[in-house]
Amino acid sequence: MNSDFPRIITLLRKERGISQKNAASALGISQALLSHYEKGIRECGLEFLVKTADYYNVSCDYLLGRSPEPAGKTISYEDIPEQDMSGREKITAAGGVMASFNKKLVVNSTSVLFSLVQKTGSASMLKEISSYLMLAIYKMFRIVYSANSKNDPRFFTVPEVTASGTATAAMAVCEANASAAAKGVQVNGGDVAKESNESMITANSLSEEYSGSASSLLNVIKNSEARIHLLTSSDK
C-alpha cells in the first residue's frame, strides 16, 4: 500500500478547508470509505485516484508521492533558476551535472527559507537560523579542507579534534533557540515570531509565490525525508 497517498489526500483536503463529508460527497463515496482511505486502512482503485487528482487539481504522481510538486513536474537542471550573479557556472568533471544540480537546489532553497523567516518578523529566528547554516558550512568546509594533506590545520583556530563536536553542539543550541522563537518563547531577551495573517504554507502557495525556486525546496524536502526514512526503516 502506498504510504504517501493517505497523508497527501488528508493534507490537501485540510489545506482547502473542505470537510471530510463534503469531500466524500464530491468524490462519490461514503464518508466512512474516505476516512479509511485517509487513514490508510483501505487502498483505493485507479478510478478513485484519477477522480481525486481532478478534484484537487493535482497530478496522480503528486498524490502517490512520486513528485513533490502538485503538477507532478519532474525537475531538471535547466528548470532551476540561477542565483549566482556571475550567471551560469561551468560544469566541472568533479561531480559533473549532479554537483551543479545539487548546488542550485541548496542555493534556491536557502533563498526561499530566508524569505519565509523574514516574514515571521523575528530577528532572533533569523540570527539563529543563519548561524546554524553557517556552522553547517563550516563543518563541511573543514572536511573538504582535510582531504588535502598539504593543507595546514593551523588555518583554523579550533583544533580538529574538537571542531566537529563543538560545532554540532552550537548548531543544536541554534536550532533550540530558533524553535523557541517560532513557538513564541523568548530566550535570552530575544524576540519571537509574530502570528502571521497569511494563509498556511502549502506546496501550491510556495509554487505561486516563489515560482522556480519553490521546486528546489520541495525537492530538498522530498530527498531529505527519503534519506531519513532509510535510517528509520524497520527493514534495515
Image: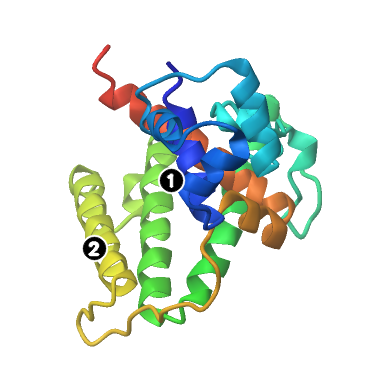
Q: Residue 49 or 117: which is nearer the viewer?
A: 49
Residue at disc 2, secondary structure: helix
Contact, mark 2 vs mark 1 (Cβ under 8 Å): no
Residue in view at x 44 percent, y 37 percent: 31
The residue pinned by badge 1 equals 141
SS label for mark 1? helix
**Circle 1: residue type:** Phe
What quarter of the picture does the N terminus occupy?
top left
**Residue 222 horizontal/vertical position (percent):** 50, 35
Identify the mark at residue 18; answer none if there is no mark. none
Q: CA distance from mark 2 to mark 1?
A: 24 Å
Residue at coordinates 53% horizontally, 31% vertically from top-left?
Answer: 29
Badge 2 or badge 1: first in the primary sequence: 1
- Kindly identify which residue carries mark 2: 176
Crowding at dot 1, Cα within 10 Å, few <14 / some 14-19 / many 20+, comes out as: few
Find residue 62 and report its image quarter. top right
Residue type at numbered disc 2: Ala
